Amino acid sequence: MILTQDEHAAYQELGYFVREAVFDISEVTALQVAAGLAVERAQQLCKQGQAYVLDDAKFVDVEHMTVQFEHAKDSTDVRVIEPINDLVPAFDTLLDDERLLAPMRGLIGKRQLALWTAKLNLKPARCGSGFGWHQDSPYWIHDCGHVDLLPNVMLAIDRFTAANGALQIVAGSHAQGRLPGCSDERQLAGFYTDPNAFDVDAAQTLEVAPGSCIFFSPHVVHGSGPNRTELERRAVIMTYQPGGYAALKSGQLRAVGGGPALV
Ligand SMILES: O=C(O)CCC(=O)C(=O)O
């Protein structure tokens, strides 16, 4: 079964559903090791990259990869690496896992799928910053003609708790389509959803065990708090699309699931 009736109904009504214990502890441990390797490689590669600052956070572009650092001045703590699959093979292999692809086929309604993007979000212990309320679709609308067909799956590779910045989703907000952005002085203000445009009381904090997967709509408003604990809160977020289309940052087609390269 690709999607259960409950999962289908939850995605339609709430904009997300959770599958627990999709990956076992040995798989999660291997991904934690891969995440450590990714951080080391990213820090090394960033020495030759193009650095810039947006809203007080440092970003470094290395070819088509972007590495984002934590907001504290001169921080060397990596916050996000995108795309992650081109940096460490374990994350590339993950993209083809049927436990991700089968539900994705159900959500996208196509047999052949391709990768849109894949990120590693680190949220380091004690210093990992939160993510403001946003939808993903406004980020992608200029690069993609089918933003409705870009569902995400967030794989927790550490336990998510309210204290370490678990993902929070505003249930049902996807049904409003693309919402207005903020218009304050931040350089990236327009990418954050105007808080007057949705009901923050509908936010749900998704405390999940490592190995769990949260499938969510590109239109659902989501965010997360900072990590105030001694434990990391790492996750891989993979976004799929119908087959035959190029990935966001590489501009190359990454067909998944061993399907033909073109639909
Ligand atoms: O890692 C998180 O808590 C949220 C990440 C997110 O929303 C994003 O990367 O767009």
Image (cartoon, rainbow, N blue to C red):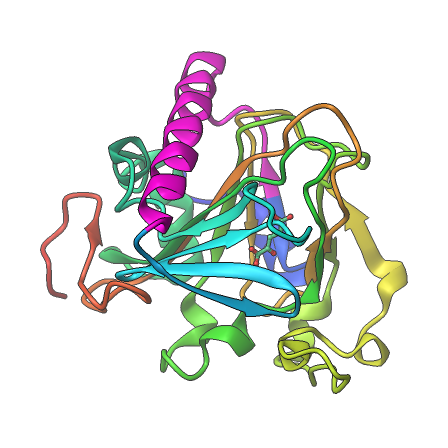
Which residue is at 29% across, 42% downward?
A: 87
Name the quadrant containing residue 123.
Answer: top right
Which residue is at 53% across, 38% downward?
A: 235
- Could you tell me what secondary structure mostly forms the magenta stretch? helix
Q: For the magenta stretch, what is the residue range?
A: 18-47
Q: From the viewer's side, name the closer residue of 3 and 237.
A: 237
* Whether residue 34 is situated above or below residue 58 in the rendered picture: above
Instruction: Count up the numbered dots.
Output: 0
Which residue is at 26% across, 57% downward?
A: 114
Is residue 124 rendered magenta in the image? Answer: no
Return the x and y of residue 173 as percentages of the image width and height. Answer: 72, 69
Return the x and y of residue 95 as percentages of the image width and height. Answer: 31, 42
Return the x and y of residue 219 as percentages of the image width and height. Answer: 59, 70
Name the quadrant containing residue 218.
Answer: bottom right
* Whether residue 68 is situated above or below residue 43 in the rendered picture: below
Residue 137 is left or right of residue 221, and the answer is left
* Whether residue 80 is situated above or below residue 155 in the rendered picture: below
Task: Give the position of the N terminus as an image quadrant.
Answer: top left
Residue 36 is left or right of residue 88, and the answer is right
Q: From the viewer's side, name the closer residue of 255 and 88.
A: 88
Task: Give the position of the C terminus as an image quadrant.
Answer: bottom left
Q: From the viewer's side, name the closer residue of 128 and 25.
A: 128
Residue 263 is left or right of residue 14, and the answer is left
Which residue is at 65% across, 82% downward?
A: 190
* Whether residue 204 is situated above or below residue 146 in the rendered picture: above
Name the quadrant containing residue 140.
Answer: bottom left
Is residue 30 rendered magenta in the image? Answer: yes
